[in-house]
Structure formats: structure tokens, C-alpha cells
Image: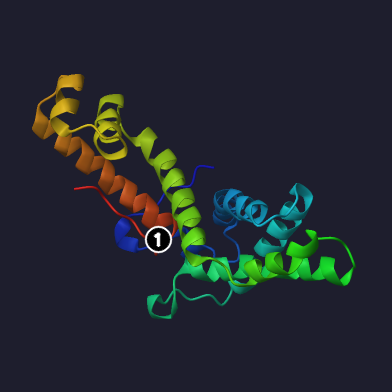
Amino acid sequence: MALRTDSPSTNITLIGRLRAPDDDTAWRAFVDLYTPLVYRHCRGRGLQDADAKDVTQEVFTQVSRGMRTFVYDPSRGRFRGWLGTIVSHAIGKHFTRLRRAGQGVGGSDAGGLVAGAQNENDAAWTEEFNTQILRSALDRTRPEFETATWRAFELTWIGETTPQEAAALLERPVPWIYKARFKVLAQLKEQVLFLTADVAFFAKD
């Protein structure tokens, strides 16, 4: 979904826009962005397809309610941690319901599955979260640049090609390669900050 950022000076983020009850475009963009992440995480915790979809829907219901009062405060934790906690609790509740209903949830491993959902591996969730954000930011950034500029960035930042090697491949001066990469990175960072103001972002030297 096309959803362009405002001027960086306005400091408007997708998460910030969700506070507006009538911003349906922002909410749809948010759901499109985070649904694959939540669904994959549920599947990775052992949920079947239908159950993963149900839990994902429950997560967004909780997010919708919580976003009305959510205030981003880095000193109190990151947005990804807040979302991760909601996902973890939703998965835990799912396995608890199965257990109370007397349904099998993996035999002798059932307790471990529930405990794993309730005591989320923060490193795993963070990696999945950051990967999803970066992938989306790359997709949103690429159309903004001509092919050669993007290729210079792709070779030297995503790949392992040196600026000197990229210059030879693209038949451009080495300073041009550095400039092209810098321009793309600047736009990429802006997109990352728009999608989630608190994601960890590391640029190569």
C-alpha cells in the first residue's frame, strides 16, 4: 500500500498516525506491514495455519485497543517490545485454551510450548521484527532511485562488493559510488524511522 512519509521535520511516524482514530490508511498500512511478522512468529511457535491466523487477528484487536493510549517512551521500552509482549501473551492464551479444552498441543512438550510463548526469546523476536521492517523499508525506498544508484547501494551495502569494484562494474567514479550509497541510506533510514521510530538500524562503514 502506498503511504508516503511527511517531511522529516514533522516527525510523523506510522505508529504516531495510528493515534488518530480516523486514519484508516495508516491502520491498513500498519496491518499490511506487521501481519506477516506476527503470523510467521505464531507459526514458528508451533501454531497451525488456522490457529496462527486467529491469534494474529487477536493480536491486532489488542493493538487497536492499546494504541489509543500508547505513548512512545524509549525509557520505558521499545514499540517492538510492546508488540512482542502482546504477541507472546496471545500465543500463551491460545495454548492455555487448548489445554483447558483437553486438546493435544504436542503431548509431553505441551508445557514447554506454553512456557516458550509466555517467556518470549527477545533476541529472536527482535531479529524477526528488524528483518521485517528493513525488508519493507527497502521495498519502499527502491522506487525512489534510478537503477544505477540503487545498484551501487545494493552492491556495496547489501552485498560484499567494495566501492572500487562497484565503480568498475557500473563504470562510474568511486566518489559517485559513495555518494549514491549515502543518498539511498539516507532515504532508507527515513523510511525505517517512519515505519517504526525505535527499530535498531545499523549501516555499514
Image quarter (top left, top right, bottom left or bottom right) of the N terminus: top right
Q: Residues within 10 Å of mark 1 (few under 14, many from 20)?
A: some
- Looking at the picture, does residue 134 appear above or below residue 173? below
Q: Amino acid at mark 1?
A: Val
Closer to us: 145 or 104 = 104
Identify the image quadrant of residue 115: bottom right
Give the colour scheme of this rendering.
rainbow
Q: Is residue 51 left or right of residue 186?
A: right
Q: Is residue 138 visible?
A: yes
Residue 174 in the image, given as x and y percentages of width and height: 10, 30
The residue where tag 1 is placed is: 199
The residue sitting at 50% across, 42% down in the picture is: 2
Closer to us: 96 or 158 = 96
Residue situated furthest bottom in the rendering: 76
Residue situated furthest right in the rendering: 102
- Looking at the picture, does residue 17 appear above or below residue 28? below
Closer to us: 103 or 70 = 103
Q: Is residue 111 left or right of residue 80?
A: right
Closer to us: 17 or 84 = 84
Residue 148 in the image, given as x and y percentages of width and height: 26, 25
Count of numbered tags: 1
Q: Is residue 113 left or right of residue 105?
A: left
The residue sitting at 51% across, 60% down in the picture is: 125
- Looking at the picture, does residue 59 appear above or below residue 152? below
Residue 17 in the image, given as x and y percentages of width and height: 50, 62
The residue sitting at 45% across, 50% down in the picture is: 131
Identify the image quadrant of residue 175: top left
Secondary element under disc 1, as helix, strand or loop, is loop
Residue 69 in the image, given as x and y percentages of width and height: 56, 77
Q: Is residue 19 visible?
A: no
